[in-house]
Amino acid sequence: MKLPDDIEAKIILRNNSPVDDFGGLSPTEIHHLLYDTFGDKSPVQLQDDIGDKTLDQIPLFRIVEEYLRIIQRDKQIKLTPLGALPKKVMVELYDKRYLLDEHIESGITKLWKEDDCIAIKSARLTAELAGFVRKANGKLILTKVATKLLETNNRLQIFRQFFQAFTDKFLWSFNDGYPEQPIGQLGWAFSVIMLDKFGERPQTIDFYAEKYLRAFPTFITFFRSDYATPERQFFRCYGVRTFNRFFLWFGFATVDQQKKYLDLDNDKFKRTDLVKNVFKIDDKVRCWLPV
């Protein structure tokens, strides 16, 4: 049944009108941003050409590149009885020092097993989700896709597939004890828009988390008042997933630490040039977002 023209016009107008809680995005734009992030109608997309100089500055990508090269060199990696990377491979990857773990660097933790370095473990799991690596008889081997990309040195395509797998397939909640809801991961591109808009000046995580919660208020219902208020737990969850283990891992932000260890309540973050080098963000989105 076809709706009357006046009702249909109102629906179209509403779906395409800016909404303050969405930072000025319309419901239609938010839909594309959430469910077709890399599509033509999304207000955030990857740049068509991301050069080697930019790729060299993306820490988690450098880890997965080295990981794939190790498998290419050794033909395979034999997993431990628990199905993890052996210590020898972990040490080789960590010694590249692309991403430093504050607990390992301070001596609190030693790099004995895969769980001692979340970044390397996350890169390894994401490489499998991206279709680069597969398991066979307790060993890790390269797929035909990865072999071809490495042989042709197609770094851009490796990055594209890895990044899409990290944002769409790898569960960010896997790395923490917060609710298994996609807090931070759903609408990660919305956080990129905010970082692009406001990241020139140092801002605390609360600054961004408050705006994210305004756009996705249902997420607060997954927290209970126990050791902290639901709001404080939500802000820290968002901070860990979006800033600590996404923006910092990919080099999209830097942090001005107030103490020896990362302090999600007080540290301030700034965006880097990688945001503009990696993403295309619709110009009108920058104009709509309120300060």
Image (cartoon, rainbow, N blue to C red):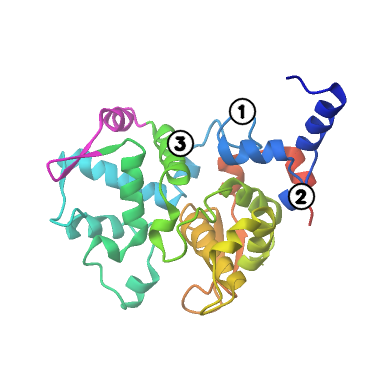
Q: Which residue is drawn at the image coordinates 56% and 76% (left, top)?
A: 225
* Residue 71: mark in rendering: none
In 3D space, how far apart are the residues under numbered discs 2 and 3 (Cα atoms)? 27 Å
Q: Residues within 10 Å of mark 1 (few under 14, many from 20)?
A: few
Q: Which span is picked out in magenta?
A: 134-153
Can you see residue 199? no
Residue shown at 12%/56% (left/top)? Answer: 81
How far is mark 2 from mark 1, CA to CA? 21 Å
Give x and y (percent) for residue 144. Answer: 26, 28
**Pair 3/1: label in front:** 1
Dot 3 or dot 1: first in sequence order is 1
Residue 56 coordinates in the image, percent (x, y): 44, 46
Quarter occupied by the C terminus: bottom right
| Of pointers 2 and 3, the one earlier in the residue sequence | 3
Q: Which mark is residue 289?
A: 2
Along the viewing direction, whichever of 219 and 85 lies nearer the viewer = 219
Q: Amino acid at mark 2?
A: Leu
**Relative to residue 241, is residue 64 depicted above or below?**
above
Q: Quadrant of the N terminus?
A: top right
Asked whether 38 or 173 is in front, the reply is 173
Number of numbered discs overlaid on the protein picture: 3
Determine the residue located farthest toward the right in the rendered image: 6
What residue is disc 3 on? 160
The x, y position of residue 132, in whole percent, is 31, 36
Residue 79 vertical position relative to residue 52 in the rendered view, above or below: below
**Callout 2: helix, strand or loop?**
loop
| Magenta highlight on residue 17 | no
**Label 1 sits on residue:** 40
Q: Is residue 136 magenta?
A: yes
Q: For the residues labelled 2 and 3, say whether their Cβ atoms are less than 8 Å apart.
A: no
